[in-house]
Image (spheres, rainbow, N blue to C red):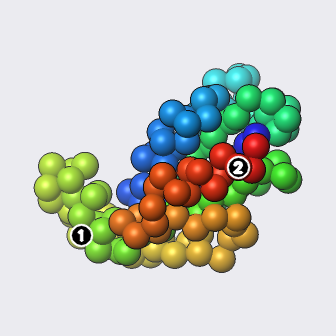
Amino acid sequence: MVIAIFGESCTGKSTLARALKERLGGEVYTGKDYLRLAKDEASAKKLFREKLASALTGDPAIYVIAEPEHLSLVPAGAVRVLVTAELETIQERFAQRMHGKLPPPVAAMLERKHGCFDNEAHDYHYISGETDLGALCGQIETKR
């Protein structure tokens, strides 16, 4: 089983990934983890695609994605989970990462990126602060 968890920074993707790993086991990959598989990016992407494709029928692989271009690495047949949060929530969480202060250029970047995943195909939609995490994990578990 491959579970692709995708959304903007600070929406709750890692929280969902940890909960799914606890429940299902398997490996969690984030962002450009695939670069460790080979010396050049093209080879690493190819190997990562193969690794994910083989996980469709094996142990779970959970891929946490914060950049839209990484969705192209997700194989057909993967469970796709869109994770969203209100812009204000994202800004508050990002400010916490930056010791309580959100610089104006960072705030502007977050505003520009907000909603960049909203039109991507997905099987489930996790809305941070609204969706029941345990219930969603249970629904995904039944897909096994």
> Residue, x 58% and y 67% (percent of image)?
125
Image quadrant where one finds the N terminus: top right
Q: Amino acid at mark 1?
A: Pro
Q: Amino acid at mark 2?
A: Thr
Q: Is residue 74 above or below residue 29?
A: below
Is 124 situated left or right of 79 in this image? left
> Residue, x 72% and y 69% (percent of image)?
121
Looking at the image, is mark 1 or mark 2 nearer the viewer? 2
62 or 39, which is in the foreground?
62
Image quadrant where one finds the C terminus: top right
Question: Which x, y percent locates residue 112?
Answer: 44, 75
Is 2 situated left or right of 131 in this image? right
Circle nearer the N terminus (1, 2) = 1
> Residue, x 36% and y 74% (percent of image)?
87
Question: Which x, y percent locates residue 95?
Answer: 22, 58
Residue placed farthest to the left in the image?
A: 100
Q: Secondary structure at mark 2?
A: loop
> Residue, x 36% and y 66% (percent of image)?
129
Q: Residue 95 got which mark?
A: none
- Is residue 15 visible in the rendered image? The answer is yes
Question: Which x, y percent locates residue 60?
Answer: 70, 34
Q: Is residue 59 above or below residue 19?
A: above
- Is residue 33 visible in the rendered image? The answer is no
Q: Residue 142 got which mark?
A: 2
134 or 36, which is in the foreground?
134
> For residue 34, what is the image quadrant?
top right
Is 93 situated left or right of 40 in this image? left
Label 2 Cα crowd, 10 Å radius (few <14 / some 14-19 / many 20+): few
Mark pair 1, 2: CA separation: 43 Å
Question: Which x, y percent locates residue 65?
Answer: 58, 50
Q: Residue 104 got which mark?
A: 1
Q: Is residue 41 above or below residue 17?
A: above
